[in-house]
Image (spheres, rainbow, N blue to C red):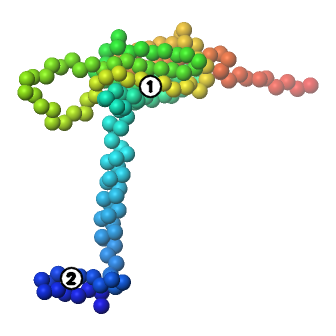
Amino acid sequence: MASASTESGALTREPGALTRWNPFREMTSLRDAMNRLVDTSMVPWSIFGDGGAMTFPPVDMSETENEYIIEASLPGIKPDEVKISLQNNVLTIEGERKEERERKEGERTIYREHRYGSFTRSFSLPSPVEADKAEARFENGVLRLILPKAESSKPKQIHVQSR
């Protein structure tokens, strides 16, 4: 017998007794597990380091035959607060986002997603670029860099001759 009734009417399980499989109970626990996984791995605030410093502002990088195009989302950052450097084929974008709003006396934060502090992002470019010909534009909180590829890194055509 898989279960027995008690005086209160509740069911109890005997050790080693077989119970009927309920697929919906398993699906519920799988759904809960997936929700926990998404909650812990997809939260964008995991990109922030200790002390609220932004360590990885989102960056998109693409290329054409002649250049690399990098776009970094930096909302709330002023162009003069961003420093861009290129050394040994490593591009670094860094700066600081400052909180400019003054808090009112007695104001209490309930929920806060905006982060303030210094940020940095460095990554290696796939091939050498001509830094002196690079362009940087800052519009609507998006930094757009255009880095021309060095001539030595561009593909060369070799003409095949016949005898």
Viewer can see residue 64: no
Q: Label 2 is placed on what type of residue?
A: Leu
Per the image, the residue denoted by label 1 is 121
Residue at horizontal 55%, vertical 25%? 124
- Examine the image and state in which quarter residue 156 appears: top right
Report x, y in % for residue 15. Answer: 33, 83
- Give above or below for 106 relative to 36: above
Judged from this view, the residue extending furthest toward the bottom is 1
Residue 84 vertical position relative to residue 36 in the rendered view, above or below: above
Question: How many numbered markers are drawn?
Answer: 2
Which residue lies at the image location 37% right of the left edge and 34% below the top edge? Answer: 47
Q: Disc 2 marks which residue?
A: 11
Q: Provide residue 113's location: percent of width, then percent of height.
A: 25, 33
The mark nearer the N terminus, 2 or 1, is 2
Is label 1 in a helix, a strand or a loop?
strand
Q: Residue furthest right?
A: 163
- Above or below for 155 versus 11: above
Which residue is located at x 58 percent, y 13 percent? 130
Left or right of 21 in this view: 122: right
**Front residue (pair 130, 4):** 4
Mark 1: few, some, or many residues within 10 Å (few <14, many ≥20)? Answer: some
